[in-house]
Amino acid sequence: MLLTIPGLLNAAQLDKIHQVLAEARFVDGRLTAGFAAARVKQNEEMQAEPERMQLLIRVLMASLGHNETFRFAALPHRVADPIFARYQPGMTYGDHVDDPIMGTTGPRFRTDLSMTIFLNPPESYDGGELVVRTSFGDTRVKLPAGDAVLYPSSSLHQVAPVTRGERLVALTWIQSYVRDAAQRELLYELNLARERLLKEGPGTETTGYVDRSYANLLRMWAEV
Ligand code: NI
């Protein structure tokens, strides 16, 4: 499932992030890439200076923690510290899958989901679409500033070359309580039904069946 999350960051949060990034140093993105990815990766990433990073993490984690779509779609167990990447004209990131296991400084974790958060308005740069290759064809994603897209870390994807302006994004990876993408998608939809029922008929028998089924399916599939 490829899911967009509109308005993950509000205007104030975007401003704050832009302020911090304007003073940051960016270095060659190949420094954080595995062997295979380094061959196709051509971008720049913010140097993770601790104080600056803490500030950015606070803004981002607050918005993620409050976002219901993110919480119910990702069922996040662990969320990686974000990477801030920029692509200037000529930069690109060819086809790759993301590293399966991450966490060089903190605890190691499995990457089930990848998330790209767009930080610059789409009309300010040309190219730079995230192209996710699914079994139903390519999906090209380029969203308004503040919007995010969530996709399985196992999917082949690339960033199309930027030809004008600057593509600025935040990236993070999630280990989900539910490892299997199909199970996560089923839980996500069942929860949408559950929430509607809880709103429209909180005391009915049907609501009870669906509510308990959601809780018990999650219990059956969750790994902690
Ligand atoms: Ni990637």
Image (cartoon, helix red, strand yellow):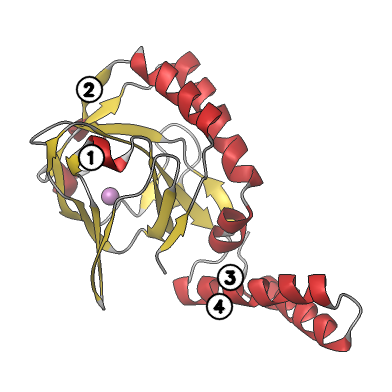
Cβ atoms at labels 3 and 4 below 8 Å apart: yes
Closer to the chain start, of discs 2 and 1, is: 2
- Disc on the earlier residue, 1 or 4: 1
| Residue 60 percent coordinates (x, y) | 53, 35
From the viewer's perspective, is the residue at label 3 or at label 1 nearer?
A: 3
Q: Which residue is mark 2?
A: 27
Residue that numbered label 4 is attached to: 186
Task: Tell me what residue is drawn at x 40 percent, y 39 percent.
Answer: 145
Q: Position of residue 108 (x, y in %)?
A: 46, 44
Local SS, label 1: loop
- Outermost residue on the front side: it is 123
**Amino acid type of disc 1?**
Ala
Image depth: mark 2 or mark 1 in front: 2
Amino acid type of the residue that numbered disc 4 sits on in the rendered structure: Leu
Query: Can you see residue 82?
Result: yes
Residue 7 in the image: above or below residue 214: above
Counting residues from the start of the chain, the first of labels 2 and 4 encountered is 2
Return the mark for residue 188: 3
Q: Secondary structure at mark 3?
A: helix
